[in-house]
Amino acid sequence: MKWMQRAGAVCLAAGLALLSACGPSEAEQKQGAWDEFLSRTDEGHKTSVTQGTAPDLTAYPYPDTLAGTYDTQDPWYLDSGAGKSTLTAQEAKEDAEAFFQLLHDFYGGYGYFGGDEAFRPALEQVLDDLSGETMVSAKSLQQSLESTLTPLILDGHFAINGHYLSAAQRQNMYYVPDLYLDEEQAAAMDSAYVKRTIGPDGALSWCFAALSRDGRDLPETLGKYTGLAWTLAEAAPGAGTTAYERREADGLTVLVNQVLSDMGAEGDSWYERMDQLNEFADSGESYRDLPVFVIDLRGNIGGQPAFARRWFEGFVGAAPSPCQSTLIRWSPLNGYMEALGYPVPEEPGEPVIQKTEGAWVEQDSVIFCLTDYATASAGEWFVGDLRTLEHVVFVGSNTCGATLMTNNQTYCLPNSGLSVSFGTSLMLTPDGNREESGFQPDLWVPPQEALEAVSRLCEYYGLNP
């Protein structure tokens, strides 16, 4: 009897050992968790690329005639030299009317934001603000234009005298430092304030993170957590400095691209900048065989999207095809667009409208793309192109929110010399206007810590080459 009991115990122990041996190892569990996350991320990106329909831009009321005349031999709309700090009432009225005339004739968002029905009352409001004054400061004129237009348009590129109207509307990432949740804890919280992140050990985790203009609308208590210290996620340093660098960090290949423009570079630095931009644009093919690499777009303030698209085409072998519609209006400043090969209207009237249906690209490399709120304009269009690729994970904070307008140009008002910057082309995706929040990341990490967090994740899940 005792022998049978001992034999039974041995069999039970052997069975338990066998079950243990048949269960997934720690490495297999990690691999499964990573594969599931990547699959869900791909599914979300693919749906946004392929399930939408390019918007119909013919529905918006764009004028078919010009309200003003524009002599290219005597371009009053480009001359800021005679700017006055104080204007007569008549001069202020002329500037206000010139401002809205420029919008009527050239602004790519004119029809999208309501056309004459929206902008004519706005002009009347500005004139009413200025009425009763014999002298008007240029600053007062600017303030009136801004306060009237800010509720009307949401455009990350639109600026008056260098001040971006969307600054007051823009939302940034806020997070609670050093607080991580597991999946069960996260599921019990309000999903508006819980996001995926990378934990201190490199494992996929959850954190408190959300978008807000100033953080004051975020809750101090969530579940059992009280006194939450919401903190603005600061952008990474060095915005707009590096056109191209390829380097290694903890065994990972990192492509750094912080600017896509030659603006601000002069003399030898201009040639150096252009050499770097062309080196970047031509380097895409060299990344094809890497199993894992990082594209660091933190601080990419934009420029010419053609450089990024050349990189994409070199990497993939085909041009990117995000789902979007583009409307291009005539402007006397469109010459450089035409020189770059963009289709432009030959004369005022019917704008050029283009549509592209989204195409999803399958590829094998795992790409971590780092972003922050200084990732803007053409830098964000690069993000949009990368979202059409399989196995791309975006890490950091949301981007700036400056993708709605392209072909941005600067004009001047005739008396005050105030500069007015806006785009003549509208670019819209099925997601609508994202100027308030930009592109949101898949893994929410304070941007200054994003590269180190990706390194930890790759080590934890065994992704390092």
Image: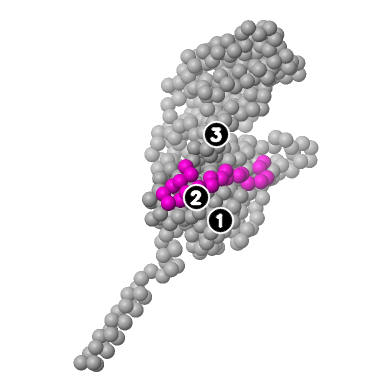
| Residue 311, image quadrant | top right
| Residue 418, image quadrant | top right
Above/below status of 108 relative to 311: above
- What residue is at 58 percent from the left and 10 percent from the top? 128
Tell me, for residue 453, which label it has, or none: 1
- Residue that lies at the very extreme toward the front in this rendered image: 227
Q: Quadrant of the C terminus?
A: bottom right
Magenta-span inclusion, residue 183: no
Closest to the camera, between mark 1 and mark 3, is: 3
Q: Circle 3 sits on which residue?
A: 170
Disc 2 marks a residue whose amino acid type is Leu
Query: In the rendered structure, which segment of residues is drawn in magenta?
Result: 219-240
- What residue is at 76 percent from the left and 18 percent from the top? 81
| Residue 314 seen in render | no
Q: Are marks 2 and 1 in contact (CB under 8 Å)?
A: yes
Instruction: Tell me residue 318's x, y (percent).
Output: 51, 44
Q: Principal SS element in the magenta part? A: loop
Viewer-nearest residue: 12 or 308:
12
Disc 1 marks a residue whose amino acid type is Ala
Q: Secondary structure at mark 3?
A: loop
Viewer-nearest residue: 286 or 77:
77
| Residue 93, image quadrant | top right
Instruction: Tell me residue 202's x, y (percent).
Output: 52, 60
The 10 Å Cα crowd at callout 3, few under 14, some 14 to 19, many 20 or more, is many
- Residue that lies at the very extreme toward the right in this rendered image: 267
Q: Is residue 207 left or right of residue 22?
A: right
Q: How far apart are the two marked residues, 2 and 1, measured between alpha carbons? A: 10 Å
Q: Circle 2 sits on which residue?
A: 443
Q: How far apart are the two marked residues, 2 and 3, measured between alpha carbons? A: 20 Å
